[in-house]
Image: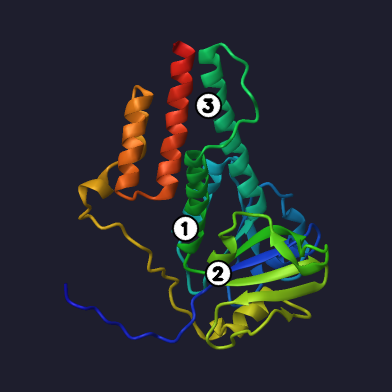
Amino acid sequence: MALNLTKPTGRPSWPVVLLDGGPGAGKSYAIAVASGSELVDGCIWVNFGEKRPDEYAEVPGANFAIAEHDGTYEGLLETLTEAVALGQGEKPRLLALDSATKLWESINVATQAKADAQATARADARGRVPVLPAEVTPELHVEARERWQRIVDTLQAHQGPVIVTARAEDASIVDDSGTIIVQKSRVLAQKSLGFEAGAIIDMPERGRAILRKIVSARKPMDAAEEWPDFTVDALWRRLGLHEGADARTYDRAVQSPQLSPTQARNWIAEVKACTDVASADRLIAEAESVRRPAETVAAMRGIRDGIAELADALG
């Protein structure tokens, strides 16, 4: 394959901005103000689990429309996908999701409900009372992260500015003597959110903003910065986006179509097809011998334990 080289443009792309803070800190107000920026052509506001933002239409200059959906994860994903598919006009359109905290809570609730249903089915087969809430298996944890990542991938596909809100709480780390050695804000969402964001603004209280992260070669930051009179518009301008922007692109890892037989095997499906514990154990041992990911092996063990429980019930 011929080497393909391209020269960097030096131009920024629209970031995913994370606004985190406690209730009433001004996150939603900041979205409303940003929607009126002369750099954007309004805003599509996607609400999830938060109070409807109708009243923010009274914010001077606010220019947004609320995207309706049925409140489910599937409805949210479909709505975001449709919003991204609208494309951009002469100016980019802001896309806002409020809030990531409620989304991750919803995914966790659904994951726990599925774990409880599986545990109940196993207990019923054995004529026993299920122990609830059930332990969430590694396989279900993987499924939850995949559901989260589909939302993130959709937001990142938007070729314009994105704002995501999340709630945060103070977290402290203490030493053995009980002395606080670190105190910082902890975002209440899936832990990868901070890595996915191009800029993070902590809003610990109304009227206060702290710039925690900014991905910029133009004006990099050395440490967290207090930002009096913060606005998202001012952040965009600091990044140089008023001078033009490139498309947001990600060089994601793509699985090679030339997979080895070991890589191509669906180990989870194979262990699910096992009818006895011995065959499941042999398959797990084989997966370990060819160094399959620890997460895959852990999920296989969870399925194996379910087979064992069912065998006990029927035996």
Residue shown at the point (72%, 50%) measured from the top left: 52
Residue 118's disc number: 3
Q: CA distance from mark 3 to mark 2?
A: 41 Å
Query: Nearest the camera: 228 or 52?
Result: 228
Residue 37 coordinates in the image, percent (x, y): 64, 75
Q: Amino acid at mark 2?
A: Pro
What colouring method underlies this structural image?
Answer: rainbow
How crowded pointer 3 is (Cα within 10 Å; few <14, some 14-19, many 20+) is rated as some
Mark 1 and mark 2 residues within 8 Å of each other at the beta carbon: no
* Mark nearer the N terminus (3 vs 1): 3
Mark closer to the observer (3, 2): 3
Quarter containing the C terminus: top left
Q: Amino acid at mark 3?
A: Gln
Residue 57's disc number: none
- Give the answer, above or below, for where 20 lies relative to 230: above
Residue 82 coordinates in the image, percent (x, y): 48, 52
Q: Secondary structure at mark 3?
A: helix
Residue 51 coordinates in the image, percent (x, y): 74, 49
Q: CA distance from mark 3 to mark 1?
A: 29 Å
Quickly name the residue at label 2: 161
* Mark nearer the N terminus (3 vs 2): 3
Residue shown at the point (64%, 70%) measured from the top left: 200
Residue shown at the point (50%, 39%) measured from the top left: 140
Name the quadrant containing residue 238. Answer: bottom right
Q: Amino acid at mark 1?
A: Asp
Quickly name the residue at label 1: 153
